[in-house]
């Protein structure tokens, strides 16, 4: 896939502020508006840009707990289990991992009761062998705007 310095500049600016108009973006990086629009459309078609969203402060919204949950599965049903877990609105990320656990889940909760209910619901999913929950005490960095 061809990905040059201009594409990088466009993406870096959109990561900082996805509300920039094509005209504003073009002015910032010294290109024509038509060129910027064309580049953005190509980046979207190639699925490099998959959407636009707002970044939220979850603590201000009341999500005081971040949990990292390791899930061990049995009987090779990992993909089905991952898809079921991913349906939960508190789940931010679901990863296949190496090591003793098979799945890593990152989720946010408003209180311990919500976390407890979620962890208990995981154990009711067929072929979930066990879970191990880690509660985040402090977030030093949480930013997925990587390029």
Image: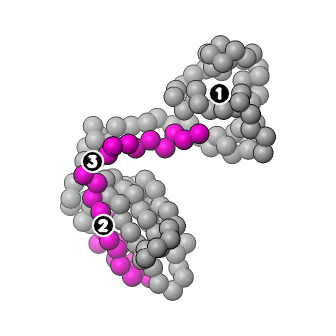
Residue that badge 2 annotates: 133
Q: Nearer the viewer, residue 114 or 140?
A: 140
Does residue 73 lie above or below 145 as drawn?
below
Which one is in front, 119 or 135? 135
Look at the numbered disc 1 and give the secondary structure of its residue: helix
Label at residue 9: 1
Give the labeled residue for mark 3.
138
- Which callout, 2 or 1, points to the residue nearer the camera? 1
In the rendered structure, the answer to whether residue 16 lies left or right of residue 135 reads right
CA gap, disc 2 to disc 1? 39 Å
Q: Nearer the viewer, residue 67 or 118?
A: 67
Residues drawn in magenta: 118-147
Instruction: Determine contact: label 2, label 1, CB under 8 Å.
Output: no
Q: Secondary structure at mark 3?
A: loop
Q: Residue 14 appears in which quarter of the rendering? A: top right
Q: Alpha-carbon neighbours of circle 3 within 10 Å: few (<14), some, or many (≥20)?
A: few
Question: Above or below — where is 39 with respect to 67?
Answer: above
At a point 43% along the width and 36% down the height, the residue shown is: 55
The residue at the point 40 percent across, 72 percent down is 71
Horizontal and vertical percent for residue 10? 65, 28
In this picture, residue 34 sits left or right of residue 52:
right
Q: Position of residue 113 (x, y in %)?
A: 20, 61
User: SS at mark 2?
Assistant: strand
Quadrant location of residue 29? top right
Percent position of residue 109, x then y: 29, 53
Of marks 2 and 1, which one's residue comes earlier in the chain? 1
Q: Name the N-terminal-most of marks 2 and 3.
A: 2
Alpha-carbon distance for marks 2 and 3?
Answer: 15 Å
What is the crowding at mark 1: few (fewer than 14 residues within 10 Å), some, or many (at least 20)? some
């Amino acid at each position: 896939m061809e990905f040059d310095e201009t594409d990088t500049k466009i993406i870096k600016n959109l990561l900082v502020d996805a509300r920039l108009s094509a005209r504003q973006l073009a002015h910032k990086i010294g290109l024509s508006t038509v060129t910027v629009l064309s580049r953005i459309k190509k980046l979207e078609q190639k699925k490099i840009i998959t959407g636009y969203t707002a970044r939220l402060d979850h603590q201000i919204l009341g999500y005081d707990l971040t949990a990292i949950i390791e899930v061990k599965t049995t009987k090779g049903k990992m993909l089905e289990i991952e898809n079921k877990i991913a349906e939960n609105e508190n789940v931010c990320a679901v990863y296949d991992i190496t090591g003793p656990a098979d799945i890593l889940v990152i989720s946010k909760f408003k209180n311990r009761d919500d976390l407890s209910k979620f962890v208990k619901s995981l154990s009711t999913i067929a072929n979930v062998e066990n879970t191990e929950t880690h509660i985040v005490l402090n977030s030093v960095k949480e930013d997925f705007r990587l390029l």
